[in-house]
């Protein structure tokens, strides 16, 4: 698509902060869920992590999809679908970035449950850490921090 000056979509550089609506699409995008792969038979281990540790609620899968295994969880506006993959290998780099309101409390909860928390201060304007679920999926948890300069 060729963009011209004055076209509302010609502004293709936006804030990496991820907050607010510095660019609206004509389609009304919104994230419904994030899909993560899990190995067959790991539903209980995933339930232990996502429900018991993270405090999410399990969602009943539609019957047509329940036969495939896996599980779905939700908390606030975040929904994660954990789907069985035959030759499962956790992604080494790909991950969801999950915004939270109390990063320290979550880090403490994960650590208390035996999950390693790896802090990373390389995202201006945010505090964040990485952790892995019980099957090795990488997760990023972050919180906007007004005390950290957002410029880069």
Image: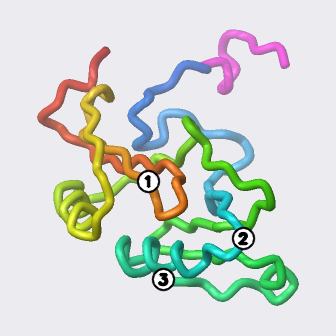
Secondary structure found at label 1: strand
Residue 56 lies in the magenta-colored region: no
Q: Residue 132, which numbered label? A: 1
Q: Residues within 10 Å of mark 3 (few under 14, many from 20)?
A: some
Q: Residue 57, which numbered label? A: 3
Secondary structure found at label 3: strand
Give the magenta-colored segment's residue range: 1-11
Mark 3 or 2, nearer chain start: 2
- Is label 1 or label 2 in front? 2
Q: Residue 80 at what x, y percent from top left?
A: 58, 66
Q: Which residue lies at the image location 72% right of the left edge and 84% below the top edge?
A: 61
Mark 3 or 1, nearer chain start: 3
- Is 51 in front, or is 133? 133
- Is 40 in front, or is 25? 40
- Is 118 in front, or is 59? 118
Residue bearing mark 2: 40
Q: Residue 59 at what x, y percent from top left?
A: 60, 84
Residue 2 lies in the magenta-colored region: yes
Q: Which residue lies at the image location 35% right of the left edge and 74% below the top edge?
A: 53
Q: Residue 56 at what x, y percent from top left?
A: 44, 77
Quadrant in which the C terminus is drawn: top left
Colouring style:
rainbow
Q: Which residue lies at the image location 84% right of the left edge and 19% below the top edge?
A: 1
- Is label 3 or label 1 in front? 1
């Amino acid at each position: 698509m060729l963009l011209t000056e004055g076209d509302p979509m010609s502004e293709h550089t936006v804030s990496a902060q991820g907050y607010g609506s510095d660019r609206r699409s004509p389609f009304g995008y919104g994230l419904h869920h994030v899909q993560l792969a899990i190995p067959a038979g790991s539903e209980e281990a995933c339930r232990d992590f996502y429900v018991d540790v993270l405090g999410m609620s399990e969602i009943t899968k539609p019957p047509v999809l329940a036969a495939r295994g896996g599980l779905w969880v939700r908390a606030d506006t975040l929904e994660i679908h954990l789907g069985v993959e035959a030759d499962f290998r956790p992604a080494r780099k790909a991950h969801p970035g999950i915004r939270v309101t109390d990063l320290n409390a979550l880090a403490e909860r994960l650590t208390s449950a035996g999950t390693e928390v790896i802090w990373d201060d390389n995202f201006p304007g945010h505090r964040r850490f990485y952790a892995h679920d019980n099957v090795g999926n990488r997760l990023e948890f972050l919180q906007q921090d007004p005390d950290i300069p957002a410029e880069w």
